[in-house]
Image: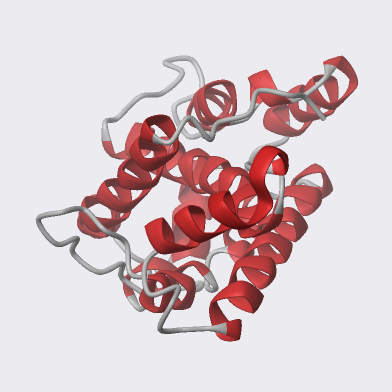
Amino acid sequence: MALLLEHQFRQLPADKQVETRPFLESVSYLPPFFDLLGSTVFAPIKADIAGNITKIKAVYDSNPSRYKTLQHILDAEKEMHGSEWPKVGATLALMWLKRGLRFIQVLLQSLVDGEKDENYPNLIRVNATKAYEIALKKYHGWFVQKLFKAALYAAPYKSDFLRALSKGREVKEDDCLEKVRQFLANFTATVDAIYEMYSKMNAELDYTV
């Protein structure tokens, strides 16, 4: 669980504004999460997340005081890019990043909720499939969907996955899942707030890759 708990997300303020710098610091530790899923098919998602973090960070670093929150970035880019927005800049990068974050969130929440294949209870295929269908599937074309279906069947055993989350340490499943639950509190609130922001600003795009 060290992979997650060492880099907790901040609790959101009442106005649900996500501060850019601490957000970038926390998400920068998440790409290795996809290594734990065992299949090289997840490598593009890992690379995509890392690349989108880099793009958002470049915009933030160009003017930290102007881009103090993610909302400030979207507002500024909307004004800057006109009709090209939201398919540009950090706005587009964050749109795809939040989908990768949703995948992680749904997968972990499904594990915490005890969802499993009764015939193969030590597999995380059910959890990973749910995460893919909710977070990513609708944005992928037929060929990419087929690749992921194969990858999901190769997902690791739950015991191996939880051990990897704990950086190889032997931990009790209940203890590990309790720590996942702790991590999910602020993480889920942050991901939800970003989705809500995109919805309010009509910045969501539904094209497939």
Q: Position of residue 5 (x, y in %)?
A: 32, 71
Instruction: Classify residue 105 as left or right of residue 35.
Output: left
Q: Compare residues 14 and 181 and report the one nearer the observer.
A: 14
* Quarter placement of the C terminus: top right
Give the quarter of the image for residue 17: bottom left
User: Going by the picture, which residue comes out furthest to the left?
Assistant: 14
Q: Position of residue 178 (x, y in %)?
A: 20, 54
Residue 110 vertical placement versus 38 (above, below): above
Residue 182 vertical placement versus 85 (above, below): below
Confirm whether residue 177 shows in the render: no
Who's the residue at 52% across and 52% down the image? 161
Confirm whether residue 143 shows in the render: yes
Q: Compare residues 105 and 36 and report the one nearer the observer.
A: 105
Q: Position of residue 86 (x, y in %)?
A: 63, 41
Instruction: Classify residue 179 as left or right of residue 130.
Output: left
Who's the residue at 52% across and 73% down the image? 29
Residue 202 vertical placement versus 51 (above, below): above
Residue 114 vertical placement versus 171 (above, below): above
Who's the residue at 79% across and 53% down the image? 43
Instruction: Classify residue 120 as left or right of residue 7.
Output: right
Q: Compare residues 93 and 163 and report the one nearer the observer.
A: 93
Who's the residue at 51% across and 46% down the image? 98
Q: Position of residue 108 (x, y in %)?
A: 39, 43
Give the quarter of the image for residue 148: top right
